Image (cartoon, rainbow, N blue to C red):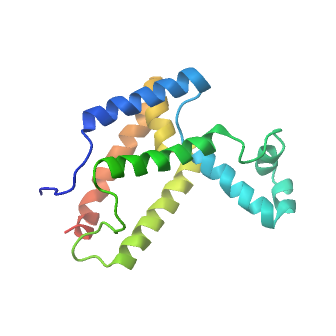
Amino acid sequence: MERSEKFWNPYLAGVALGLVLLATLVLMGKGLGASGAANRLGVSAINVVAPLHVDSKPYMASLKADGRGMLDDWLVFEVLGVFLGGAFGAFSAGRMSRKVIRGPKVTIPHRLIMATSGGILMGMAARLARGCTSGQALSGGALLSVGSLVFMFAVFGGAYSVAYFLRKEWN
């Protein structure tokens, strides 16, 4: 299958990502990750409508009581940078447009439901795994964490085992 869209060179993009990870480890003393930011944003939203609930849950209360504002965390700004970087990448590659990428037999609502369901499932799995794929694979892999390497084998194994059944979404 030939793609008509223009993409960044994957080797250059990989080097750029590696340099960002290195800079994050050196400057922040922490690796990349996104689930912590999503977690803080979620707790912040809950705190607006149900502050007593946040106060009654030790984990949520710890985020509120850590001395910083719940949105005053470097991961929140990292995720903002991911969105801005994605927009820059799409713009610089000539791919900036408003469209839903889907297979020819898939409706837009079905594609959006599938994407949203996948995102929710990944978010739940990130909480169970105590980290998202970017944190586990990139940061943990860069540090040669055995748990992160096992995680990546599980991710790729799971993806390949399910890909056959979901292939019809793109054909």
Q: Where is residue 52 in the image (x, y as percent from the top left)?
A: 87, 61
Query: For residue 27, what is the image quadrant?
Result: top right
**In the picture shown, does residue 168 fall above or below 161?**
below
Check the picture and name the quadrant holding the N terminus.
bottom left
Q: Which residue is drawn at 75% across and 62% down?
A: 46
Depth check: 107 or 117 in front? Answer: 107
Outermost residue on the left side: it is 2
* Residue 17 at x, y percent in the picture: 40, 33
Q: Where is residue 118 in the image (x, y as percent from the top left)?
A: 44, 62
Inspect this view and state whether residue 168 appears: yes
Extreme residue toward the top, this view: 26
Q: In this view, does 145 lie above or below 54?
A: above
Q: Which residue is drawn at 84% across and 43% down?
A: 65
Please tell me which residue is depicted at 68% across the width and 40% down the height of the picture.
73
Is residue 166 found left or right of 85 in the rendered image?
left
x and y percent of residue 122 in the render? 49, 55
Q: Which of 142 and 70 is in front in this view?
A: 70
